[in-house]
Image: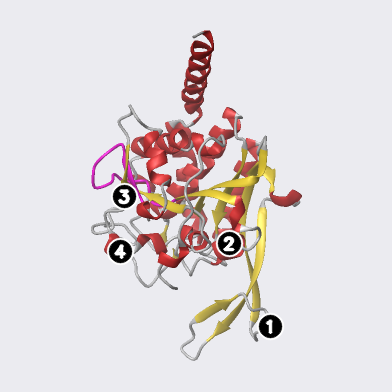
Amino acid sequence: MRVTILLFFIVLNSIVFAQKELKVISLKETKRIATNLSADNMEGRRAFTTGNEKAAAYIANEFQKIGLKRWNDHDSFLQTFQLVKKINANKRASYSFDLSQEGEKVQLSNIVGVLPGKSRPQEYVIFSGHFDHLGINARNLQNSDSIYNGANDDAAGITAMIMLAKYFKKLNNNERTLLFVAFNAEEMGGFGATYFSKQFDPIQVVAMFNIEMIGTESKWGKNSAFITGYEKSNMGELLQNNLSGSNFTFFPDPYPAQQLFYRSDNATLARLGVPAHTISTSKMDNEPNYHKASDEISTLDLKNMKEIIKAIALSSRGIVAGKETPTRVDTSTLNKR
């Protein structure tokens, strides 16, 4: 009986501690990061632009302030990769990882921060979003605005990823290694995620929380979000079980016709068998600011966004602590590219 009571209080204390550390996920910090990433001086963060490089430097600086480690002891948080750029007869650019092809060699960078695992350092849990967006389009002005700031798509996801890094650094109980990743070039075909996925054995990745467009209410209202590919692993069930007693709910993706599971950076790792899912609130059947200049910080529900980030933090703690392991994705059931 004494042992049972002692175990009860140990578990209760860990839950209370985890709840206490949620204070680092504040409205003030959520607003600060999302506002800075979607500011006009980031110029829409389009790949291969000064604005994109400025956003990368901003995220790397946030990682530095949190105290994250660099990937594989690199001298920078930037994970740089090369592509070959080719221009076709219609003056449209295409890109390839095949550096043997003729064309201009160009480079981009993901940003990767690491919180080393205490007892299972070779098991990875990934928290990610993409920081690139559509840049400036002077030919398609909206109310004289040419900058596609991408506040929801996906400054919101990057904000969540940074806030989760702050939380788990403070919590300091991750038995598994946590990788915090800001992917580049998602909007032009997921090149950043593709390169990242080749830097390790995918069997090492226990779970991937890809976060995209969580700045607006879901179709169910506040305190809710959906998980793409919910049925492809039991990860969603694990997350919801960890929120038992709360007023937050993770739902399966309500837009199966949109094929959202295959339209974000989670898809690259899911095709390698990783339980990799995207968490979102976007009403994809009626999203008035999607890929428009009107996707501004003023359109985001920052209070609700903060609560979504907290829900991700609490629901993922079993996976982070090494107590839960989602089932793998059966790659034979996935759509071909």
Q: Which residues are magenta?
A: 211-227
Mark 3 surroundings: few (<14), some (14-19) or many (≥20) residues within 10 A: some
C-alpha separation, residue under disc 1 versus residue under disc 2:
27 Å
Q: Is residue 114 magenta?
A: no
Q: Is residue 219 magenta?
A: yes
The numbered mark, 1 or 4, whose residue comes first in the sequence reads 1
Q: Which residue is mark 2?
A: 50
Residue flagged by tag 3: what amino acid is it? Pro
Q: Nearer the viewer, residue 8 or 81?
A: 8
Which SS does the magenta portion mostly show?
loop
Q: Which of the image's four quarters has the C terminus?
A: bottom left
Residue flagged by tag 2: what amino acid is it? Thr
Residue flagged by tag 4: what amino acid is it? Gln
Instruction: Decide: is 331 above or below 16.
Output: below
Q: Position of residue 171 (x, y in %)?
A: 57, 28
Secondary structure found at label 4: helix
Outermost residue to the top: 2
Circles 1, 2 touching at the beta carbon (< 8 Å) = no
Q: Nearer the viewer, residue 252 or 97?
A: 252
Q: Which residue is mark 3?
A: 252
Q: Residue at x 50, y 38 (%)?
A: 324
Q: Which residue is mark 1?
A: 100
Q: Position of residue 58 (x, y in %)?
A: 59, 48
The numbered mark, 4 or 3, whose residue comes first in the sequence reads 3
C-alpha separation, residue under disc 2 versus residue under disc 4:
32 Å
Mark 4 surroundings: few (<14), some (14-19) or many (≥20) residues within 10 A: few
Residue flagged by tag 1: what amino acid is it? Ser
Could one spot residue 127 in this view of the protein? no
Q: Which residue is mark 4?
A: 258
Q: Viewed as shown, does residue 213 lie left or right of 283?
A: right
Q: Nearer the viewer, mark 2 or mark 4?
A: 4
